[in-house]
Amino acid sequence: AVYNTEGQEFPMEVSVSDSNSGSALDSFAGWRPILVQGDGTVKAFNLADDVEHVEILLTTQTRNMKAYIEILKGPNDDNEIIEVDTDNAYLHPFYTVIQAAEGCNTLRIKNENSVEFPFEAYVRPCEGVVEEERQQFNYGGPYF
């Protein structure tokens, strides 16, 4: 389910679609995941100026997962947060493509679970989004 915790003056646009590319985990074959331990551990990724979209996959080995994904633009900008909560991230991994604002951005992934529940994060720039297909992806905020 998708919830907007902001007021009605800040609507968001969300869509879900089949990428027709098979499993999200299979698409990251050859990529090494980043282990995000629990107890508030934060992993940050600096995005270059030319990165317009970021692919993110969060998964575990038959454990529950509680995570925050944030896109930060600057110190005085409103950050955008996606909260992920699943009971078995191996069966139900979280995959999304997020549009980044122009310029340098920082992507933060935070594990809100206890230290016994780490998860793996795959992060990479997304090359496959074109202007006509934008409505198929979750852009997650009022500014996009």
Image (cartoon, rainbow, N blue to C red):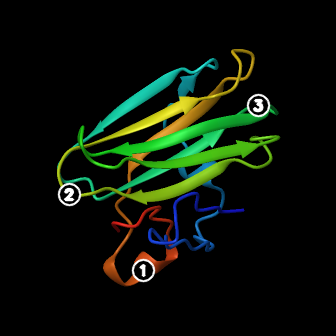
Q: Is residue 10 left or right of residue 113?
A: left
Q: How many numbered tags mark residues here?
A: 3
Which callout, 1 or 3, points at the residue further toward the start of the chain? 3
Residue 80 percent location from the top left of the image: 42, 51
| Image quarter hosting the C terminus | bottom left
- Do tag 1 and tag 3 residues touch (Cβ < 8 Å)? no
| Image quarter hosting the N terminus | bottom right
Residue 19 percent location from the top left of the image: 57, 70
Which callout, 2 or 1, points at the residue further toward the start of the chain? 2
Residue at 17% over, 51% down: 103
- Specify few, some or many for label 1: CA neighbours under 10 Å numbering under 14, 14-19, or 20 or more: few
- Specify few, some or many for label 2: CA neighbours under 10 Å numbering under 14, 14-19, or 20 or more: few
Residue at 81% over, 40% down: 88
| Location of mark 2 (residue) | 102
Gap between marks 2 and 1 measured at Cα: 19 Å
Gap between marks 2 and 3 measured at Cα: 35 Å
Observer able to see residue 33: no
Q: Amino acid at mark 1?
A: Glu
| Location of mark 1 (residue) | 133
Please tell me whether mark 2 sits on a helix, a strand or a loop.
loop
Query: In this orientation, which residue lies closer to the viewer: 11 or 51?
Result: 11
Residue at 61% over, 72% down: 16
